[in-house]
Image (cartoon, rainbow, N blue to C red):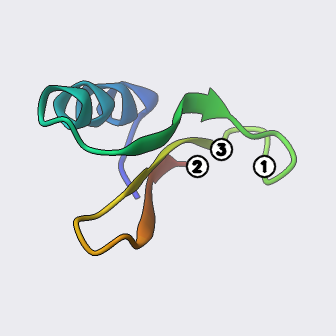
Amino acid sequence: MVESEDEVNEIYKWLKKEDINITDPPTHYPQYTDKYYATFFFDPDGIKLEIAYY
């Protein structure tokens, strides 16, 4: 969890630069909460992770 949508976006840019396998770019997910904003990616072991602000 991070403290702002901007942090999600900055980490997303870093993930792209590092050629990390991103499954979902930063997006709002109102089905979770009205402020949920996240990006999802796989770590080197194939585990799906997320960076989220909510």
- Residue 29's x, y, as percent? 74, 40
Residue 36: which quarter of the image?
A: top right
**Which sits earlier in the primary sequence, circle 2 or circle 1?**
1
Instruction: Name the disc covering residue 8, or none.
Output: none
Please name the amino acid that badge 1 sits on: Thr
Most extreme residue toward the right, as rendered?
31
Residue at x 25% of width, y 24% of height: 13
Residue 8: which quarter of the image?
A: top left
| Placement of 47 over or under 13, stated as above or below | below
Q: Which residue is mark 1?
A: 33
| Placement of 39 over or under 32, stated as above or below | above
Q: Residues within 10 Å of mark 1 (few under 14, many from 20)?
A: few
**Which sits earlier in the primary sequence, circle 2 or circle 3?**
3
Q: Which residue is mark 3?
A: 36
Please name the amino acid that badge 3 sits on: Tyr
Please name the amino acid that badge 2 sits on: Tyr
Is label 2 in contact with label 1 (beta carbons under 8 Å)?
yes
Is label 1 in contact with label 3 (beta carbons under 8 Å)?
yes
Q: Report, in whole angstroms, how far the alpha carbon at label 1 lies from the one at label 3.
A: 5 Å
| Placement of 10 over or under 50, stated as above or below | above
- Residue 49's x, y, as percent? 43, 63
Q: Residues within 10 Å of mark 2 (few under 14, many from 20)?
A: some
Q: Secondary structure at mark 3?
A: loop
